[in-house]
Amino acid sequence: MEKQRFIISGGGTGGHIFPAISIANAIKAKLPQAEILFVGAENRMEMQRVPAAGYRIVGLPICGFDRKHLLKNVKTLWNLLRSLRLARRIVKDFKPDAAIGVGGYASGPLLRAAASLGVPCYLQEQNSYAGLTNKWLASKAKRICVAYHGMEKFFPADKIVLTGNPVRQDLLKGASLKNEALAHYAMTADKPVLLVVGGSLGAGSINQAMLAHIDELEAAQVQVLWQTGKYYYDNIQTQLAGKTLKNVQVTQFVDRMDYAYAMADLVVSRAGASSISELCLLGKACVLVPSPNVAEDHQTKNAMALVNEQAAVMLRDVEVKDKLVPTALQLLKDEAALQALRQHILRLALPDSAEKIADIVIEG
């Protein structure tokens, strides 16, 4: 049998890249001889992350539209035309059996080119509010894999398959590692653990809330792992100079996310699709703080999908400075409330997503 070939396109953020790599890994597990080519956007994080995962990637000279400075979009349009031409050449040269788009700039030109050349196309939409690229591509797609109910308002109902979002598999193995995790972070089993994460770059509002209430956190009988993100880390260290913190650990990034989740009694997080899928699969009680700086305010819609099922607590970005720490500390004192959140969020989990998507793509 001839070796099968697949193109996977998209990226721009970890929320697109991790699912894409998970899908690739699932295809390789089912078809070890398969050839997989990634197509991303030049100068975006996928150009480093994908090769690190063992896959070849080609970059397109594409970027998002600047909605505030319309004149700057002349170059953007030119790069879009170049990307469409280059995408067509990539598809002709690679001759894929199928193309998979996970959202993000690059998937637009690549999947349009693939569809025009008769290649079956599949989409994976991570959010509860569909992105512009996937809405634009929907008419060309054979199947659209989604993570939330009710996506018929964005896509043709007969194309939708509820698969959930693929997540980093190493996280799922960590659920039984709580004692190992506590030892790794020099924490103890007799006090609850609060995990605060704001994405790889960090979240300004969450960090400001933590700084404003740092004495309260330190005085509480709670252990805290606070990931600031690299953008904010140095400034926060400067502001904390002179303070002795015994219960709060401040880190630029979390070196073992599987351990961090395993030991956390409560997680404070942004509401990106990948983060929410991880929290659902791991059954973690959480306080979600949607980022206000994303297209179509989709993180608020993601968070509300959980809040409506009593599966998460949500705070708006503008109220975080005053409410985040008091809300988290109050929850950590209420084991019944934490347990209810865990039970409700676990019901929303959709396991084996990458394998389901791989099956859909392979079987055609």
Image (spheres, rainbow, N blue to C red):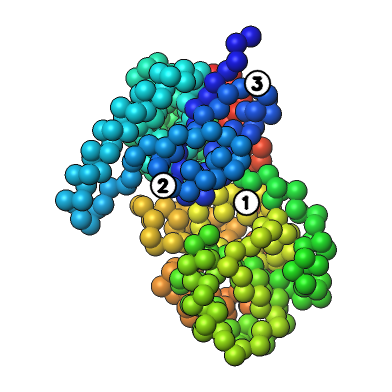
- Asked if the residue under mark 3 is in contact with the one under mark 1, i.e. CB atoms within 8 Å, the reply is no
Indicate the position of residue 155 as horizontal and vertical percent values: 40, 34
Indicate the position of residue 299 as horizontal and vertical percent values: 45, 55
CA distance for labels 2 and 3: 30 Å
Depth check, mark 1 against mark 2: the one in front is: 2
- Asked if the residue under mark 2 is in contact with the one under mark 1, i.e. CB atoms within 8 Å, the reply is no
Residue pointed to by mark 1: 278
- Residue at image point 65% right, 71% down: 225
Left or right: 69 with respect to 92? left
Q: Amino acid at mark 1?
A: Glu
Q: Residue furthest bottom?
A: 242
Q: Amino acid at mark 3?
A: Gln
Left or right: 235 with respect to 168? left
Q: Nearer the viewer, residue 138 or 25?
A: 25
Residue pointed to by mark 2: 43
CA distance for labels 1 and 2: 27 Å
From this view, report whether residue 338 is shown above or below residue 241: above
Task: Say which label, 1 or 3, has the lower sequence index.
Answer: 3
Q: Nearer the viewer, residue 79 or 25?
A: 79
Q: Nearer the viewer, residue 137 or 53?
A: 53
Depth check, mark 2 against mark 3: the one in front is: 2
Q: Quadrant of residue 247?
A: bottom right
From this view, report whether residue 362 is shown above or below residue 223: above
Indicate the position of residue 197 as horizontal and vertical percent values: 57, 65
SS of the residue at dot 1?
A: helix
Task: Say which label, 2 or 3, has the lower sequence index.
Answer: 3
Screen quadrant of the N terminus: top right
